[in-house]
Image (tube, helix red, strand yellow):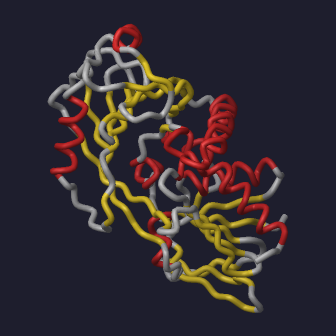
Amino acid sequence: MVETIIVGGGIVGAVVADKLQDMNKDVKIIEKERKVKQLNSNRSIWAIIPPLCGDLMEKCLSSIDYYVQLSHKYGVIYKEMSVISDKQIGREISMNKLKEIEPDVTVPESIKMYIYERALYLDGEKLLEKLTKNIMINEEVIGYEIKDNKITKLHLSSGENISVNGDVIFSTGYLTGKLFDIKDLEVYKGHLISSSSSFTLNNIFFYNGKIFLKRRSSEVIISSDAEKTTDNKINYEKVKDAVNTVNSIYPLSHRILVSVGFRTASSSKKYVIEKIAENALVITGFRFGFAMAPFIVDEALGLLKSGSS
């Protein structure tokens, strides 16, 4: 069977693999990181909040359906819940009702709060482990050869080459610029902050620009504001702002762990699917790669199958 090679084993590449395997395609993922835990995708909060998807909200709702099915298929823990925000993302919720469903969250009474009743969190690291098991090779692709408008070889950092007989899909995320000159791509840095709390938290909160939720019995994870930079150092001011914002309405412990992650965004405010050869294309998401991966991948596979440019 002719093999499809996927370069990049984050959530987009993993979804590509899942969908191709459902079509009985033979797939291989080439990923530079040695362990799933080290993947950039794991610097994500692993939540889908449909109102934040803007014009693509309906597609993000369908992504929830896809991931719920996938979670059942692979035995991955997930939770469907509401998202509560100081932004007008849904219907207004009274302070009495908020206190009823979130007794340990204290929001100033002068602030209007809103609720949207369908969002998703899942154990993304476990999902990646399941989706990439037995099909991932730990190598870094640093170049490629094109002949007669087809990619024929991939060059690895080890000095070896891989011959290409089928299609190649590059889901290279924030490292896309190392292989391709796609002018409107921008890299943003964010922080995933882990803390803990003994207090109840039943839903996802999007408050003062910060997203936070309870992942396990006591672990609280927070997503900080993103900034346009490729610097991988922790921005302690961003972290402090995120922690203080959450702590102002929901009590956290003093234990804080921080990891830095990156995302690639298109300045044209749209995800990128670019055909670079007859048998190859580049996929990367805009803003919320996890939420958008299922329908971006469907569109990309349709483009590759059609042979259109």
Residue 237 in sight in this render? yes
Q: Residue at x 63, y 37 (%)?
A: 61
Q: Nearer the viewer, residue 251 or 170?
A: 251
Splitting the image into 4 quarters, where does residue 195 fall?
top left
**Where in the figure is residue 291, as x and y percent of width and height?**
56, 45
- Image quadrant for the N terminus? bottom right
Residue 136, horizontal then vertical, whole percent:
59, 57
In depth, the one of 136 and 229 nearer the eye is: 229
- Lateral position of residue 217 relative to residue 83, left or right: left
* Residue positioned 74% across, 71% down in the render: 167
Asked whether residue 30 appears in the rendered view, the answer is no
* Above or below, comparing residue 71 to residue 229 in the picture: above
Q: Quadrant of residue 75?
A: top right
Check the image and report above or below for 147 versus 161: below
Q: Position of residue 85 (x, y in %)?
A: 39, 30
Quadrant assignment, res 153:
bottom right
